[in-house]
Structures are given as structure tokens and as C-alpha cells.
Image: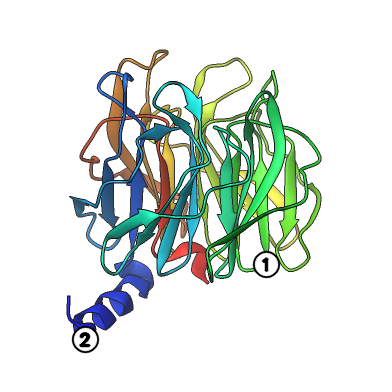
């Protein structure tokens, strides 16, 4: 790609409704294969194409990034082993290389951040974890962050330019607890609880709200419920339900809409789905989206126009 074309590609990736969501990894082939597959989902047109494969097939991992790169970190890899591995995906060129490893091997982590750093939080290593990693994009450095105030696995996470909200998850039972991580000071404090006990769903948002959708509810049943966390005022409300119940899905979005993609829609992992749902923030409208290119569950996603920053 010429330098001129690279500049144009980077420019168009950052226009809010011309950006895309990148959905990666997960369990495919009836929940038996740890996939490296990625989908690029363009928000404006709902067009989907395959992206560059990740460097390591894994499930139950997390992703965050900037308008130029996405970092995929942690997860459950071949041999049923937790991993510290990260992928660094450059949006303008679709190049995927190995990033700096995380400080703790775990699965079921969540990730969120701003244009400077991403926070990989919680998960399961030898038990439910409160550990955090700070991944600084400039220099690709990783350092331990402050521990969360509770250990949790398969939690939700989203951020704007100043704070991350990590919520829900499980530590033997599903949770509504949520935490606020202030990015400038690396301080962790309590935040407003979610409206329902839930874990293992998709997370995304804008500069004003975090949106969590799908997952398992208090009875362990697959859910279509969404939670909207408004950063200003720290209020939580139930959003419009997704078009179907779904668990172990992923989400990415821009300032206009969120895309919730793939996951499982029944009680077992043998029938993952490729379905997606579009959630338009204005009016809280939900509609069917374009199916992803590979049915899978326990995947993750990142946006080329994250959080509106």
C-alpha cells in the first residue's frame, strides 16, 4: 500500500460511520475449534469481509484499542491453557503482529481504555481474578495496574476518554457489581450496579454511555437484556433487548450504533451462531444486522472508531 493510500485508509477508518468493528477468535466448528478468524463489519453499509487472521486461536479473551490499532489479549488457548499472548492489529493495513504479553495468564478478562492505554481486567487464572494489566500503546509496554475491588470472570467493559466501566461477571454466582477505573490516576472506585445479574455478553459504547448486551442472567439462562451505563451521573437503565437471546457474544460500535455479533443462542456450545444485531443509540432501536462470516462463540471485538475519542 502506498503512503498516500495508507493516509486515506487511516482517514476513512476514523470517520464515525465509515469505521468498522473487528470481531476475532472464538470457538467454532460446534464449539470444538479455537479460531483465528476475524470479521470486519463496516457500520455505514453493514458490509462484512474477512480480516487478517490472528496469530493465536483462542476463546474467552478481550480486546480494546485506538483509532489505529486493536489489541487482543489473554484467553483460553490450545491445550486448555490460559495465555498472556496479545495480537496487535493495525486497522489501516490489516497487518496483525504479536504484541507485548500480558502480566498474568488468564481467560474471561475484559478490556477497555482510551487513546493512550488499554486496561485488561479480571478473568480467571488459578481462580477468579482481580488483576489488571495496563497496555500502553506507545511503546507497547505492559505493567500491572491496581487490583479490582472484587475478583470476577467474564465481565463487561467499556470506556470513554477518561474512565472505564467494568461490570457484572461471575465469581461463583452472577453479579451486578460494577467498578469505575479512572485512566488518568489508575484509581478504582465503586460504580452504579447493573440492572440485572449477568456475565459473558458483549460490551461497547460512546463518549456518553457504555452498552452491555446479552450473556447469562441470574438463573443461568441466556439473555437478550441490555444495560446502558451513562457516564455523566453514573446512572444505569435497561436498554432495548437484542433481537434474540445470546451468550458469549461480542460487540463493537461507533457514535451511532453498536453491533452485537455471534455467540450461542441455546443452552449448549455445540451450535454457535453467526447472527448479528444492530443497536442504534438514537431511539434505542434494534434491528438484524449482517451475519458474520463464521459461526462461533466466546469471541471478542474492537472498533476502529472506539468510544468516540
Q: Is residue 81 left or right of residue 179?
A: left
Packing grade of label 2 (10 A; few <14, some 14-19, many >=20) is: few
Q: Decide if residue 280 is in sight here.
A: no
Of 106 and 175, nearer the camera is: 106
Determine whether the residue tagged by mark 2 lies in a helix, strand or loop.
Answer: helix
Residue at image x 47%, y 66%?
A: 66
Residue 14 falls in which quadrant of the image? bottom left
Q: Is residue 150 left or right of residue 68?
A: right
Using the image, determine if residue 147 lies above or below residue 41. Answer: above
In space, the residues marked 2 and 1 are separated at their CA atoms by: 33 Å
Residue at image x 24%, y 54%?
A: 46
Residue at image x 27%, y 41%?
A: 37
Residue 261 falls in which quadrant of the image? top left
Task: Name the residue beneath numbered marker 2.
Answer: 4
Task: Name the residue beneath numbered marker 1.
Answer: 162
Residue 110 position, x and y percent, is 57, 43
Residue 299 position, x and y percent, is 40, 36
Residue 95 position, x and y percent, is 28, 61
Kindly report which numbered mark, 2 or 1, lies closer to the viewer in this rendering: 2
Amino acid at each position: 500500500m502506498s503512503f498516500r493510500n495508507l493516509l486515506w485508509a487511516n482517514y476513512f477508518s476514523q470517520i464515525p460511520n465509515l469505521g468498522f468493528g473487528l470481531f476475532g477468535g472464538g470457538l467454532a466448528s460446534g464449539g470444538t475449534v479455537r479460531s483465528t478468524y476475524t470479521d470486519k463489519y463496516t457500520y455505514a453499509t453493514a458490509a462484512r469481509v474477512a480480516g487478517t487472521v490472528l496469530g493465536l486461536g483462542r476463546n474467552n479473551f478481550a480486546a480494546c484499542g485506538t483509532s489505529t490499532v486493536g489489541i487482543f489479549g489473554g484467553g483460553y488457548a490450545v491445550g486448555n491453557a490460559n495465555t498472556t499472548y496479545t495480537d496487535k492489529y493495525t486497522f489501516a493495513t490489516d497487518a496483525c503482529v504479536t504484541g507485548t504479553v500480558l502480566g498474568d495468564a488468564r481467560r474471561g478478562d475484559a478490556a477497555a481504555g482510551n487513546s493512550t492505554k488499554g486496561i485488561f481486567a479480571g478473568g480467571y487464572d488459578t481462580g477468579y481474578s482481580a488483576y489488571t494489566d495496563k497496555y500502553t500503546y506507545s511503546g507497547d509496554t505492559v505493567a500491572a495496574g491496581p487490583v479490582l475491588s472484587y475478583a470476577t470472570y467474564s465481565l463487561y467493559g467499556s470506556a470513554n476518554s477518561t474512565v472505564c466501566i467494568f461490570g457484572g461477571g461471575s465469581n461463583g454466582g452472577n453479579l451486578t457489581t460494577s467498578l469505575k477505573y479512572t485512566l488518568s490516576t489508575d484509581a478504582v472506585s465503586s460504580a452504579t450496579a447493573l440492572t440485572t445479574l449477568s456475565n459473558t455478553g458483549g460490551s461497547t459504547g460512546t463518549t456518553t454511555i457504555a452498552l452491555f448486551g446479552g450473556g447469562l442472567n441470574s438463573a443461568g439462562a441466556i439473555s437478550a437484556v441490555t444495560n446502558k451505563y451513562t457516564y455523566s451521573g453514573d446512572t444505569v437503565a435497561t436498554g432495548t433487548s437484542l433481537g434474540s437471546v445470546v451468550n458469549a457474544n461480542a460487540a463493537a460500535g461507533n457514535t451511532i450504533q453498536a453491533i452485537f455479533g455471534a455467540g450461542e443462542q441455546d443452552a449448549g456450545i455445540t451450535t454457535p451462531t453467526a447472527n448479528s444485531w444492530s443497536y442504534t443509540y438514537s431511539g434505542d432501536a434494534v434491528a438484524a444486522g449482517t451475519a458474520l462470516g463464521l459461526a462461533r462463540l466466546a469471541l471478542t471485538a474492537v472498533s476502529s472508531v472506539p468510544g468516540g475519542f
